[in-house]
Image (tube, rainbow, N blue to C red):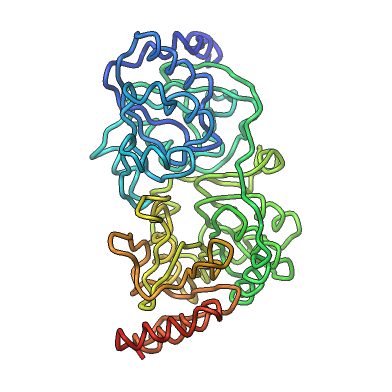
């Protein structure tokens, strides 16, 4: 029955995108779920004049989006909006050719439903099962919501996309068109490791008790933390981003989920970003469960986890404890993402901790990431009232319950030593010490 319906809806990318109308708002699958064949077909339709203009909402656009709908020759055809700026659209946002939409990640599904609107959703999914269901695979996040509220839903089936459990399924009856494209899903870039990463990772690992539930981002620092947790036991995962470091901890028996208070023995995430080994590990793994970011990143849900530990990064922090994780050199550099979701949810958890980690300097040690005040116009990602632990290679600062004077001392003590004298001078001018 479902195979017949599948065959009826199966078509080519060029035919599928004919369902898109002038001025439609298109939302695509996040990062590893970008549908390359469909995106190329939409770009071709715009270049050939079949479509003149569309709008698009992206978060962390990678090569498939950047080489098609964000290509320079289509800037007049695609009105682009970004929910989280990355290397692929940073230049466009800085020059006013792409528009950043401030948000907390857990609110994006509601923003799409009630404020932005979704006309078309295109995303990569795993092959259909016997019951007629596809899995959103690596990208549940807001993609699953966009898929269900869109006027048109077009799926790109890829046998390399893992089939994932949880609230991660969509039925063929909900789909308008299906295309097949079984190319290899590109790895998600991680970045280069700095020597200080292992030092920071070790300091953070000492803040993580056995039986804790973890949220970690993707990249060098989270992987460094994971490497330092190998002697822990019965850790759990409730995370925005699932990545390779977590796979290693599960395989080594460090992460079991046995002590979790919600979804025990399940590794809960909303988006996965990593390599081929991670994709293979996730596929048909009953311990892996994904849910929309409106659930996973909801601070009230996060707080239900006992000993919830959130680990995120920042760009700079001032002497009051205000943290900027998204603004650099006068421009939007990234986004709030789920940082504040987990900062607040983790602290509200019983015995929970929120940890913000960063290298003490930038630009080869010439610039301090601990500053006396944030530059005018800089964004505060985590307000000073919410900042809990700060960690650099020089130490750990716990700001909760501390006065402004005590905070200034704590923060300066984790700055690079060569900047501390000047920071104390600035603190005195601000009457903090």
Task: Point out residue 262 in the picture as x, y percentages from the top left corner.
Answer: 51, 60
Q: How many marks?
A: 0
Residue shown at 40%/84% (left/top)? Answer: 408
Residue shown at 39%/27% (left/top)? Answer: 121
In the visual, does 10 lie left or right of 254?
A: left
Task: Point out residue 401 in the picture as x, y percentages from the top left corner.
Answer: 38, 85
The residue closer to the viewer here, 71 or 111, is 71
Residue shown at 70%/67% (left/top)? Answer: 228
The residue closer to the viewer here, 325 or 145, is 325
Task: Point out residue 251 in the picture as x, y percentages from the top left corner.
Answer: 74, 54
Locate residue 129: give its quadrant.
Answer: top right
In the visual, does 136 lie left or right of 336?
A: right
The residue closer to the viewer here, 284 or 421, is 421
The residue closer to the viewer here, 4 or 365, is 365
Outermost residue, left side: 115
Outermost residue, bottom side: 433
Q: Quadrant of the C terminus?
A: bottom left
In the visual, does 4 lie left or right of 161?
A: left
Task: Point out residue 216 in the picture as x, y percentages from the top left corner.
Answer: 55, 59
Residue 166 higher or lower than 323, as above or below: above
């Amino acid at each position: 029955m479902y195979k017949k319906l599948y065959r009826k809806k199966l078509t080519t990318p060029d035919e599928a995108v004919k369902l898109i109308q002038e001025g439609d708002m298109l939302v695509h699958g996040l990062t590893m779920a970008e549908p390359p064949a469909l995106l190329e077909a939409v770009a071709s339709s715009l270049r050939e004049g079949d479509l003149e203009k569309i709008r698009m909402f992206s978060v962390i656009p990678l090569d498939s989006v950047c080489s098609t709908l964000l290509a320079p020759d289509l800037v007049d055809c695609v009105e682009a909006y970004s929910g989280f700026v990355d290397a692929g659209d940073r230049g466009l946002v800085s020059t006013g050719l792409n528009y950043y939409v401030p948000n907390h990640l857990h609110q994006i599904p509601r923003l799409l439903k009630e404020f932005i609107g979704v006309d078309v959703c295109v995303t990569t999914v795993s092959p259909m099962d016997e019951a007629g269901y596809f899995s959103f695979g690596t990208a549940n996040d807001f993609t699953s919501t966009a898929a269900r509220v869109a006027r048109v839903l077009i799926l790109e089936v890829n046998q390399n996309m893992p089939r994932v459990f949880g609230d991660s399924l969509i039925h063929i009856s909900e789909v308008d068109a299906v295309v097949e494209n079984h190319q290899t899903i590109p790895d998600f870039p991680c970045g280069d490791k700095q020597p200080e990463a292992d030092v920071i990772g070790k300091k953070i690992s000492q803040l993580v008790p056995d039986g804790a539930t973890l949220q970690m981002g993707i990249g060098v620092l989270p992987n460094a933390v994971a490497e330092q947790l190998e002697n822990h036991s019965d850790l759990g995962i409730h995370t925005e981003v699932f990545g390779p470091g977590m796979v290693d901890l599960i395989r080594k028996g460090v992460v079991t989920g046995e002590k979790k208070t919600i979804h025990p023995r399940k590794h809960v995430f909303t988006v996965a970003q990593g390599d081929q080994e991670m994709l293979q590990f996730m596929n048909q793994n009953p311990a892996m469960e994904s849910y929309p970011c409106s659930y996973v990143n909801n601070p009230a849900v996060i707080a239900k986890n006992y000993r919830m530990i959130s680990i995120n990064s920042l760009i700079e922090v001032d002497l009051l404890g205000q943290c900027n994780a998204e603004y650099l050199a006068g421009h939007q550099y990234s986004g709030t993402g789920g940082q504040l979701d987990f900062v607040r949810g983790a602290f509200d958890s019983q015995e929970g901790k929120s940890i913000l980690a960063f290298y003490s300097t930038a630009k080869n040690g010439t610039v301090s990431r601990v500053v006396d005040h944030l530059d005018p116009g800089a964004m505060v990602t985590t307000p000073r009232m919410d900042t809990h632990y700060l960690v650099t290679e020089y130490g750990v600062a716990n700001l909760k319950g501390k006065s402004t004077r005590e905070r200034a001392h704590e923060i300066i003590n984790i700055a690079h030593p060569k900047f501390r004298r000047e920071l104390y001078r600035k603190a005195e001018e601000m009457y903090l010490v």
